[in-house]
Amino acid sequence: MKQTLSLKLGQHLAMTPQLQQAIRLLQLSTLDLRLEIQETLESNPMLELEEEEASTESEMLAETQTVSPAPVSVTTTGNESEDAATSVDNAFEQPIPDELPVDTSWDDIYQPSSAMPTTQNSDGGGWDIDATNSTSETLQDHLLWQLNLTPMSEIDQVIATAIIDAIDTDGMLTLTVDEITESAASFASLGDGIEIETDEVIAVLKRIQHFDPTGIAARDLGECLSLQLMALPSETPWRGKAVELVENYLDILGARDFTTLKRKTKLAEKDLACVTALIQSLNPRPGTAIASEEPQYITPDVTVKKINGRWVVELNGEATPKLRINDSYARMVRRADNSADNTFLKNNLQEARWFLKSLQSRNETLLKVATKIVEHQRGFLEYGEEAMKPLVLHDIAEAVEMHESTISRVTSRKYMHTPRGIFELKYFFSSHVGTNTGGEVSSTAIRALIKKLTADENPRKPLSDNSIAAILADQNIRVARRTVAKYRESMAIPPSNERKRLV
């Protein structure tokens, strides 16, 4: 086989480290980007925060402009200074009495130290509530605290602990009485020869059900509602009928079969409406009142404002810290020096420049994509969800001359602050449904129309999915009944039979 040499021309994409870094920063969320910046600041001495330098300069300027008070000269003789030192020593040597007067203040005996740590805000304006309430109390902690205040025998405390462990975050009991009996009996601290009966578990369960919040440790929804009703004052109107309804006819009430309810409870329609209103005022998940999740705050990446009739898109300057290269270290780099220290400085300087360039590229791409989204969805900003237009990644990719994968990275976990709220950039992309006139309607707009129709419907005769599809067809929107049902379920709107209620 003969060997030959030949030249070929071709194109291929080389994934350089700089390109990989730019792509990785592009898909990071605001929180992840802050962590990445913090790690880079700790590893690269060439980078620094602009805020730190600005605050240092302002503090130095404030110190130079501050007028120092005139010095006060105090002249004391030798005897006076000796007397003063003696009085201070005597003050520390005086013993503290065992019994103090009733009106004695703690500060009169022990002087507070200026070095004591205090939990205050960074601006010095009062106590930091977030720091003092950093750990939230769980439902089990709340119940165990009440258990410790309740006089019980050792066996009953073991049973109560097993019951509390079997309560979920909603406040419902997840185990049966027999399972709790077996769980409590497995504790080794009870000793040999001790048996736990089912009646004992039921008796302890009744005591736990009187704990706060009301309705806790219920075995089913009917018992949970019944416990809350029985805790109401006896003179509460319709309390007895409400207890009867939740204990015997709760499944019929869940099916909204008011005709059968009126026949079984022998109540008029107006009276039944009062009873159902009392039941609806109860909390079916009492545990959520204690075990509430901490709020998750979102920092928007871009903001949209209407200035002089134009929608202006701006990057949120507070989302990420501003970086720059440290001039002092950069001036220490020498070109012709190949020492280890100079090589270290050169490499870090080059990495710092690449990192700043990648951050700038990320901000420019994000701003460009957000601007095109706002231009396309101007109707949403003006009129709301019903004016949302169909939009896919390909449309924005063509407008900004980028690949769809890049647009997908930019819009993932990035948020926009608008006058209508904070939305993820992915929210503005939706599929479309055809109209009878040949146009297109966004699925988000259809969801908004369905939500509006169900909110304005007659509660005695709610609209079915077929009726909603017919109403949309009258508006030249071709939507099948199953599509209406899919959109309705995605918005957690129950079907028509469950939306029916008495007025």
Image (spheres, grey):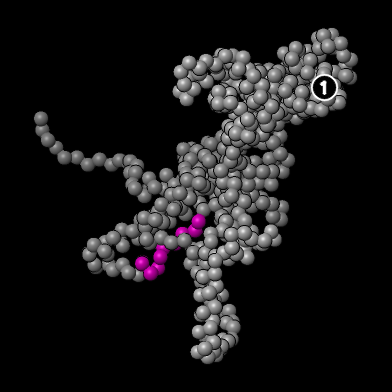
Quadrant occupied by the N terminus = top left
Q: Position of residue 118 (x, y in %)?
A: 56, 58
In depth, the one of 482 and 6 nearer the eye is: 482
Q: Quadrant of residue 330?
A: bottom left
Whether residue 325 is in magenta: the answer is yes
In the figure, is residue 239 to the left or right of 92? right
Task: Please provide the residue range marked out in magenta.
Answer: 321-330
Quadrant occupied by the C terminus = top right
* Residue reaching furthest to the left: 1
Q: Quadrant of residue 283?
A: top right
Q: Quadrant of residue 343?
A: bottom left
Q: Which residue is mark 1?
A: 239
Q: Position of residue 127 (x, y in %)?
A: 62, 56
Q: Residue sitting at 45 percent across and 49 percent down?
A: 35
Q: Residue sitting at 89 percent across and 15 percent down?
A: 268
Q: Position of residue 480 (x, y in %)?
A: 67, 18
Badge 1 amino acid: Arg
Whether residue 426 is in magenta: the answer is no
Q: Position of residue 142 (x, y in %)?
A: 61, 35
In depth, the one of 55 and 113 nearer the eye is: 113
Q: Element at badge 1? A: helix
* Picture layout, residue 165 above or below residue 249: below
Q: Residue sitting at 34 percent across and 44 percent down?
A: 15
In the figure, is residue 181 to the left or right of 487? left
In depth, the one of 145 and 281 nearer the eye is: 145
* Picture layout, residue 48 above or below residue 415: below
Q: Residue sitting at 28 percent across and 60 percent down?
A: 344
